[in-house]
């Protein structure tokens, strides 16, 4: 009898736990419409700036290392 009561109470607990999780996930579906305007990109966000910067860095590095020999 005691085992059946424990098993029954566990089933009820799991049912309420599942219902609360279900309600929580349903509440997350609010459908917010967020519009983020980040404006125009800055100069350092441009790809060509990074490519030119890397090329200049490599040229300076080669010039410094070649001068030491």
Image (cartoon, grey):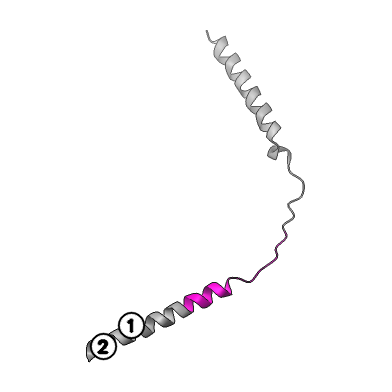
State the residue lying farthest toward the right: 40
Label 2 sits on a secondary structure element that is helix
Where residue 68 sits: x, y (%)?
54, 10
Q: Residue at x 73, y 38 (%)?
A: 43
Look at the image and give the residue range highlighted in magenta. 20-35
Queried whether the magenta region covers residue 54, the answer comes back as: no
Label 1 sits on a secondary structure element that is helix
Where residue 35 sits: x, y (%)?
73, 60
The answer to which quarter of the image holds residue 56 is: top right
Q: Which residue is mark 2?
A: 4
Above or below for 47 versus 6: above
| Left or right: 3 as drawn, with respect to 64 | left
- Earlier along the polypeptide chain: callout 1 or callout 2? 2
Q: Residue at x 26, y 88 (%)?
A: 4
| Left or right: 66 as drawn, with respect to 20 | right
Where residue 60 sits: x, y (%)?
62, 19
| Left or right: 66 as drawn, with respect to 32 | left
Q: Residue at x 50, y 76 (%)?
A: 22
Q: Residue at x 42, y 79 (%)?
A: 17
Q: Which residue is mark 1?
A: 10
Closest to the observer: 66 or 2? 2
Task: Judge depth for marks 1 and 2 and give the one in front.
Answer: 2
């Amino acid at each position: 009898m005691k085992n059946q009561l424990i098993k029954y109470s566990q089933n009820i607990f799991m049912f309420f736990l599942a219902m609360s999780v279900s309600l929580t996930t349903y509440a997350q579906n609010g459908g917010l419409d967020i519009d983020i305007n980040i404006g125009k990109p800055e100069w350092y966000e441009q790809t060509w700036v990074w490519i030119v910067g890397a090329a200049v860095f490599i040229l300076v590095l080669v010039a410094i290392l070649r001068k030491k020999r």
